[in-house]
Amino acid sequence: MRLDRGLAIAGLQRLWVGTRLDDLLAELAPEQAQRGTLQWLWSGCLRQHGSLRRLTALLLRKALRPEDGDLEALLHLALEELRAGQRPDFAVVNDWVEACAILHKEWARGLVNAVLRRYLRERESLEAQVQGARWNHPDWLVRRLQQVYPERWSDILVANLEEAPLWLRVNPQAVAPEVYAERLSEAGLPARSFAELPQALRLDAAVPVRALPGWDEGWVSIQDGAAQCAAQILAPRPGERVLDACAAPGGKTTHLLSLGVTELMALDRSSRRLDRLRQELQRLRLRLPLLQVADAAELDTWWDGTPFDAILLDAPCTATGVIRRHPDILLRRRETDLEAVCGEQQRLLDTLWPVLKPGGRLLYCTCSVLPEENQEQVAGFLDRHSDARVLEHPLCGQRLPGEDGMDGFFYALLGKIVAPACVSRETDETTRPDVTVEDFA
């Protein structure tokens, strides 16, 4: 089936003005044959947006008119496909020249043909002028990463622009992970396992989900290894009452349920995203938890006064650790977003803390690599709450994009001590005795 280039062009224009890539893909039918190709093209254009803008400027004798944004999108898509080299150059050029008719801009056929053929003639010198991952990141993010990670900032930029491997999470209620790994191998899809993540398997190359054995039967889910750490760290025990405070899209919720959690409440402010969670629960054949559309920080709208043994707070964040999976973040995220996001994180932490039982634990996590949202957020919380301590866990802390093939994530496990009055707020943090998860068991 030929690619619907009109759809590809219109979709890229929508991504440029702030549409989320996931939302755009959700508008396509799951069985649509072009879905994978569109996702690949759009993702590539988003990852290389800065380089493609620079290339287009170098190739054009004069800038395009504002009303020719569709033509600019066409050129980005065409150049990205030429750079990828998955089809013969002549076929790529011909197909995108023909796409001018879709835009009702027959006059542009000669322009598009000339631009693309010049790129092919001068590819080496042109590419040399747009080398460097920083071309494709907003200046504010590059500066911030240089400040925070002076030795590793460039590695983070490179990792952000790479295609992520396909991480799977086996549903142990349907099939044993080792059995599923054998099924993958039999299907010609060898996978790597990880001792610290018992349900995780990693494929080096992405495949359509329906190519995975037992997908329709609920044997497996797609979830990055870093995201799978949440259930392992929180480690809910039998009979515990658990709250997933910002649940959608639901990967961590379904993970907890697959591990046998029987009393779980999942909240999210988006009814649409909770509907997607319901669909996933049905596919996985998991028990439907108590789902409620609510802002977790507005207790009067959802809390019945019964405290929780464990809380998972996957807080709203800048998502700077998952750019490789959500490249639209490169265009959507603004430096001014950081203050608002940090305020929301603090509001959720402070409001949910009284909902936790003494002796309980709250797992705070973000998919960000910025300390304002992570280490500094936790430090400020500890200053405000004398009955809170950080619990040690080997999977906690900051993980950067690409480490062990995983996304960038931050985890902090907070324990609520039973008798806060006996602890001095003036105790130096570095002199406090180490606290472990077992101390709160």
Image (cartoon, rainbow, N blue to C red):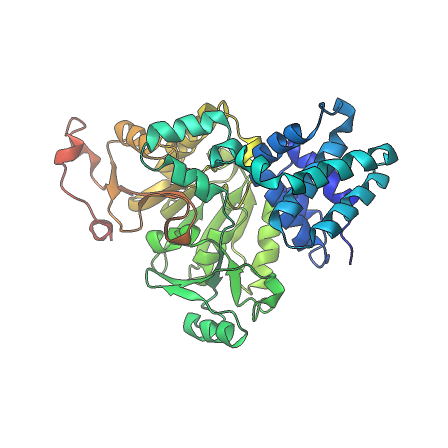
**Would residue 257 appear left or right of 62 to someone viewing this image?**
left
Residue sitting at x 30%, y 28%: 380
**Would residue 440 appear left or right of 121 to someone viewing this image?**
left
Q: Position of residue 321 (x, y in %)?
A: 44, 40
**Would residue 119 appear left or right of 67 to someone viewing this image?**
left
Where, quadrant-wise, is the N terminus in this rendering? bottom right
Residue 422 falls in image quadrant: top left
- Nearer the observer, 47 or 439: 47
Count up the numbered dots: 0
Residue 377 falls in image quadrant: top left
Residue sitting at x 57%, y 32%: 50
Residue 112 falls in image quadrant: top right
- Nearer the observer, 375 or 301: 375
Question: 343 above or below 356?
Answer: above
Q: Position of residue 287 (x, y in %)?
A: 52, 61
Q: Position of residue 132 (x, y in %)?
A: 48, 35
Q: Is residue 82 visible?
A: yes
Q: Position of residue 366 (x, y in %)?
A: 42, 40
**Would residue 70 appear left or right of 325 to someone viewing this image?**
right
Q: Is residue 245 visible?
A: no
- Nearer the observer, 95 or 48: 95
